[in-house]
Amino acid sequence: MAEAPPIRLDGETRIFPILGHPIGQVKSPAALTAIMAERGFNGLVVPLHILPQALDGWLGQAAAMRNVDGIVITVPHKAAALAHCARVSARGRAAGAVNILIREGDGWAGDATDGQGCLDAVAAAGFDVAGKSALLVGAGGAGSAIAWEILARGASDLALHDVDTARRDALIARLSADFPGRVRAGSPDPRGFALVANATPLGMRPDDPLPVQVQHLTPDQMVSDVVTRPAVPALIAAARERGCRTATGTAMFDAQAVLLAEMLMGLRRID
Amino acid sequence: MAEAPPIRLDGETRIFPILGHPIGQVKSPAALTAIMAERGFNGLVVPLHILPQALDGWLGQAAAMRNVDGIVITVPHKAAALAHCARVSARGRAAGAVNILIREGDGWAGDATDGQGCLDAVAAAGFDVAGKSALLVGAGGAGSAIAWEILARGASDLALHDVDTARRDALIARLSADFPGRVRAGSPDPRGFALVANATPLGMRPDDPLPVQVQHLTPDQMVSDVVTRPAVPALIAAARERGCRTATGTAMFDAQAVLLAEMLMGLRRID
């Protein structure tokens, strides 16, 4: 960020809160604001620490802030924010959660961009999922969004693995409504998949088990991970050792930051 | 502001909204944020455009934003914000309005700093009002705060002039409760007063009448004005021509910005 243009701050600045609990860890305010500044847009992404029990009250009056055109939603508010949307994208409905609200009149349109961020990072690493098979580990919020996006971008089939089999099966059922016959239960065995994606937090702690059996990875495979800390988690390190192409959580964050900033600036519409 | 340190923006940044309608004209976000940055404080003063009918709803949930320790209030919300204070300074009660809220637990303490800003600017110009007589024109929100401060800083007596005589008399009655026998009705004639202060918007437009009879000003007098645009309004220009010391609205804004920033940073308590 050191080379970024200085942040503008005056009465005309458009304000975009990011809501989270806790909030100290968020990197989006600086990242998204820097993208806006680079584009010559007078906007500021501002962290707001909102407790879960206060979210409904806060969002209920958010449209009254007339210089707020969009709101970024992070952990743990993504599912609860869905109820405040007058309109939700297919991605948001599939994820059961939204991470961005964009003003439409006096209401909000909601979208879930985790899947796009992940697949944009995968695409930037030179991999096109269309027509290929994929394994995804993790059927939570991020996993749901990534699964939907893998299928929406034309994967031939998707295997889902989650230790919580009820959560896995519920996601398979939701996805099958939009993409019949292309989703099934999987396992940690990555053999035979062109794309192997981790959407669990496994890898954040040094003693975490690996999300997939990395000894079976082969150089023709693409491996992606949502974990951002450490920058190179064990799965990515193992995949690189075995010659795979990789897309890290940081690459996903960067791709998503561009997407979110463009949506907040009104350059991309929620469809 | 060009020499100011760069604005910090991360998850730890303390956020201080400034509420107004309209909001495009406010200079406080940049001015107060720059003071914070100069002091090494990670804070950001953010403009929020709140419609009058939305103010109560917004302030009603404001304490839920856990990284918001203070709120700056500007036109037209100063009087309405008073009702949201769990505690109000004597200055705020006298003004019937507050321009800053500071978090105290789950509630807000309110203060009115317009008077302090004006009198700090007057003091910075080398004038001590203690023991001296003053004329103040304008009994509105800013005038009320300035009148209280003139008396609180020990002026021997204060004459108040306002074309709205009912408003003038109501303010005289309020002030007399705190400062009995030291306030009376005045006129636009400045003769005999050590301090001559304008708290009306007269001077913002080129064809405005002057708030006092400037032909009677003498070099021993101190003249202050709340008008910030133009930077040198007609009253200040005439006073300078006649050899008076002066304190402009811009000097008052600058003095008040330091005061507000120090309150937001927790360096000054509302008493």
Image (cartoon, coloured by chain):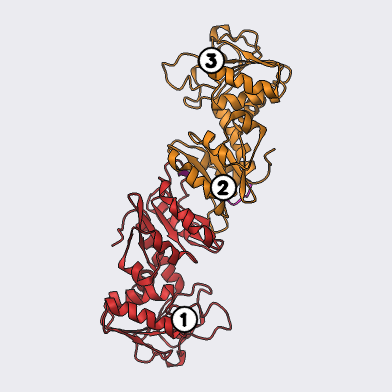
Chain colours: A red, B orange
Which residue position is annotated with label 3? B165
> Quick one: B195 or A121, which is closer to the camera?
B195
Residue B142, position in %: x, y? Answer: 56, 27
User: How far apart, in angstroms, are the residues tagged by discs 1 and 3?
Assistant: 77 Å
Check if mark 2 and mark 1 are on a common chain.
no
Look at 45% across and 22% down and name the residue there: B204
Count all numbered tags in the image, as a single digit.
3
Residue A164, position in %: x, y? Answer: 46, 84
Report the amino acid beneath label 2. Answer: Pro
Tell me which segment is drawn in magenta: B38-48
Q: Nearer the viewer, mark 1 or mark 3?
A: 3
Q: Nearer the viewer, mark 2 or mark 1?
A: 1
Residue B182, position in %: x, y? Answer: 69, 16
User: How far apart, in angstroms, are the residues tagged by discs 2 and 3?
Assistant: 48 Å
Q: Which mark is residue A95?
A: none
Q: Is residue A35 left or right of residue B5?
A: left
Report the amino acid beneath label 3. Answer: Thr
Q: Nearer the viewer, mark 2 or mark 3?
A: 3
Which residue position is annotated with label 1? A236
Image vertical order of residue B189 relative to residue B170, above or below: above
Q: Quadrant of residue A129?
A: bottom left
Look at 42% across and 20% down and name the residue there: B205
Residue B184, position in %: x, y? Answer: 64, 14
Q: Is residue B67 left or right of residue A40?
A: right
Check if mark 2 and mark 3 are on a common chain.
yes
Look at 44% across and 16% down and name the residue there: B208
> Is residue B34 a member of the stretch shown in magenta?
no
Which residue position is annotated with label 2? B5
Is disc 2 placed on a helix, strand or loop?
loop
**Label 3 CA crowd tier, 10 Å (few <14, some 14–19, many 20+):** few
